[in-house]
Image (cartoon, helix red, strand yellow):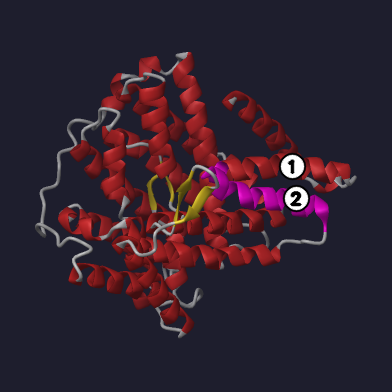
Amino acid sequence: MKSFFQFAERNTSFKQESLAGITTFLSVAYILVVNPLILSQSGMDKGAVFTATALTAIIGSLLIGLLSNYPIAIAPSMGLNSFFTFSVTIGMGIEWPVALTGVFIAGIIFMILSLLKIREKIINVIPQDLKHAVASGIGFFIAFIGLKNAGMVVSDPDTFVTLGNLTSPMTALAVLGLVITIWMLVRGINGGIFYGMVITTVVGMVFGIISMPSSIVGDVPSLEPTFGVVFGHLDQILTPELLAVIFTFLFVAFFDTAGALIALTSQAGIMKDNKIPNAGRALLADSSAGAIGAILGTSTPATSVESSAGIAVGGRTGFTSVIIAACFAIALFFSPILSVITSEVTAPALIIVGSLMAMEISKINWSQLEVVIPSFITIIMMPLTSSVATGIALGFILYPLAMVAQKRFKEVHPIMYVLCLLFTFYFIFLA
């Protein structure tokens, strides 16, 4: 096992990888609660979606861990499940089985693009400075999500966002967890992020801020309401509405995953010479999980940016992903316990991990305007639009234009010019 996962080469151990896997699971476990809540609003059975969510995360995480040896979790994407429910089923009036068929077709197309190594080629031609911008931008985005989940940042009609009520019990608990975790990390305690979440949970239950679970073991809900429904609606994929849905799923998932892979492999020290080893296998795992997830009954999965929490603890190999998959498998039977893992408990981990990922910003060449402006727009637009794909799109439009203006157009790969045009058409399509 140590040889297969290259423990020695990546300077890790069984204990370190296991702790990293548990940390990532705790950071992403909320998807087991939130995904069924969101998708059930489209008419889907909540219990079936819960089981489909867990099974998709198990399969996806195992695939990426075993095929590419990455310490990454794959689970249903928060952005895409909201798009599925509120834009497609409610907004466009498309029934959920038909929309789920669109997710399935997008997954199949992804698999073909991955096998042909088209996705891998695109990721590898992205300029180094933009890769650093994407990684740091995701760091800012993750930190913003953590601050929002903690209640430390709230919406405001005049200033858009403002400081939340730090004295409210749940927010105060998150602040305490943040202070404890920072203290442990600064003191050099390995696994500080994981221990911080455990201590925060215990303190919350002791003071009655977090409710004790009503039970320990729960039944695994049946998949019957959602399993395989996509195969009964394949004849409807050529409608203009569904083609637009498939295109949007393709676009957003493609660049969300690309951005996450760049950020996470950079954080883990896997990226070498501006290239990601085994990227093709990782993308194949991601796309396969998309098709399988649709068959099981959930919206598009993606590479989870919350994996950065486990990487920060020391996850370096695919064994971390195996542990993540095992945790999701256990969670199928112990779903009541998940109620104690609230967003306030995991918020400190996201804030700190975002801070660590934002360190990539120092590697950008800040002395050249043609690099500075596209990089800054890429970074700032991710948290401001709550979309990794939007930040990448704007950066990819501005970078070639700025390089052409500086007469450095020969330094830009032709694929980047193609992406510039595609992203421009994408924004026109959205409008």
Where residue 303 sits: x, y (%)? 45, 50
What is the C-alpha distance between the residues marked 2 and 1? 8 Å
Q: Which residue is mark 2?
A: 373
Q: Residues within 10 Å of mark 2 (few under 14, many from 20)?
A: some
In the shown orientation, is residue 160 left or right of residue 342? right
In the shown orientation, is residue 371 left or right of residue 176? right
The residue range painted magenta reads: 368-389
Q: Amino acid at mark 2?
A: Ile
Residue furthest front as drawn? 158
Could you tell me which residue is drawn at 62 percent across and 51 percent down?
A: 380
Closer to us: mark 2 or mark 1?
2
Q: Which residue is mark 1?
A: 398
In the shown orientation, is residue 365 left or right of residue 269? right
Whether residue 382 appears in this view of the structure is: yes
Could you tell me which residue is drawn at 76 percent across and 54 percent down?
A: 372
Say above or below: 8 vs 170. Answer: below
Q: Quadrant of residue 342?
A: bottom left
**Which label is found at residue 322?**
none
Say above or below: 29 vs 34. Answer: below
Where residue 61 sits: x, y (%)? 37, 54
Q: Earlier in the sequence, mark 2 or mark 1?
A: 2
Number of numbered discs on residues: 2
Tell which of 340 and 204 is nearer to you: 204
Marks 2 & 1, CB-CB < 8 Å contact: yes
Q: Amino acid at mark 1?
A: Leu
